[in-house]
Image: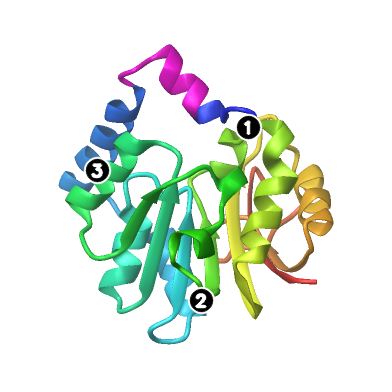
Amino acid sequence: MVEQSIWMQKVAADPGHSHWYIERFRSLARAGEDLAGEARLIDAMAPRGARILDAGCGSGRLGGYLAAAGHHVVGVDVDPVLIEAAEHDHPGPRWLVGDLAELDLPARGITEPFDLVVSAGNVMTFLAPSTRVRVLTRLRAHLTGDGRAVIGFGAGRDYEFDQFLDDAAEAGFTADLLLSTWDLRPFTDDSDFLVAILRPA
């Protein structure tokens, strides 16, 4: 067994946490907030009809947008409450409950590799620290040879950007491009957010 994720530790401590998260984004959507910035970047990078893995998909806002844009989306999240919300709010993609540290989609009948993997919403910082390299290795294993992974998270969450990039290299990735936002602003030494576009080394 792998160490339990920080997210599921939060859920164990506060059983209402997942429902709060779901309602937060439903409320933002009702208010007309733009919740698709990350998905627009992924869509711009993807060939039409791409196979996209939404790793740590939450309640499905990114994967739902990408499926509506014509891509073939599989979303995986460790939290079954979030997956249930994704199935309700964003029918179309294949939504699966699973721990990214144990990700093995071929064992679940999904044998074709992905053109793109996206992991947004600070997913990396909700992993158990002992599983970070393992998760990145599993994401790498699900990509095509020329595929790319796009991973974004904020500073101040006990995962330094330099450490993440070292972990990504250990997992078999090399960085193509580092950004500080999902709307393509360049990454600098004082950036408080990282969007890393990675490819297999």
Asked if residue 32 shows in the view, the reply is no
Going from the N terminus, do you reach mark 2 or mark 1 first? Answer: 1
Give how far across and how far down residue 165 sits, in percent: 78, 52
Going from the N terminus, do you reach mark 2 or mark 3 first? Answer: 3
Q: CA distance from mark 1 to mark 3?
A: 26 Å
Per the image, the residue denoted by label 1 is 1
Answer above or below: position of 181 versus 6.
below
Q: Nearer the viewer, mark 2 or mark 3?
A: 2
Image quarter for residue 81? top left
Within 10 Å of the Cα at label 3, are there few (<14), some (14-19), or many (20+) other Cα atoms?
some
- Assign a secondary structure to mark 1: loop
Per the image, the residue denoted by label 3 is 85
Looking at the rendered structure, the kind of residue marked 1 is: Met
Residue at 32% x, 52% y: name it.
60
- Assign a secondary structure to mark 2: loop
**In this image, 103 relative to 17: left or right?**
right
> What is the span of residues highlighted in magenta in the rendered image?
8-16
Q: How many marks?
A: 3
Going from the N terminus, do you reach mark 1 or mark 3 first? Answer: 1
Q: Tell me the quarter of the image containing the N terminus.
A: top right
Q: Decide: marks 2, 3 in contact (CB < 8 A)?
A: no
Give how far across and how far down residue 38 sits, in percent: 45, 60
- Assign a secondary structure to mark 3: helix
Image quarter for residue 109? bottom left
Give how far across and how far down residue 172 sits, in percent: 79, 63
Looking at the rendered structure, the kind of residue marked 2 is: Glu
Q: CA distance from mark 2 to mark 3?
A: 26 Å
Residue at 80% x, 43% y: name it.
163
Give how far across and how far down residue 134 sits, in percent: 71, 47
Q: Nearer the viewer, mark 1 or mark 3?
A: 1
Looking at the rendered structure, the kind of residue marked 3 is: Ala
Per the image, the residue denoted by label 2 is 112
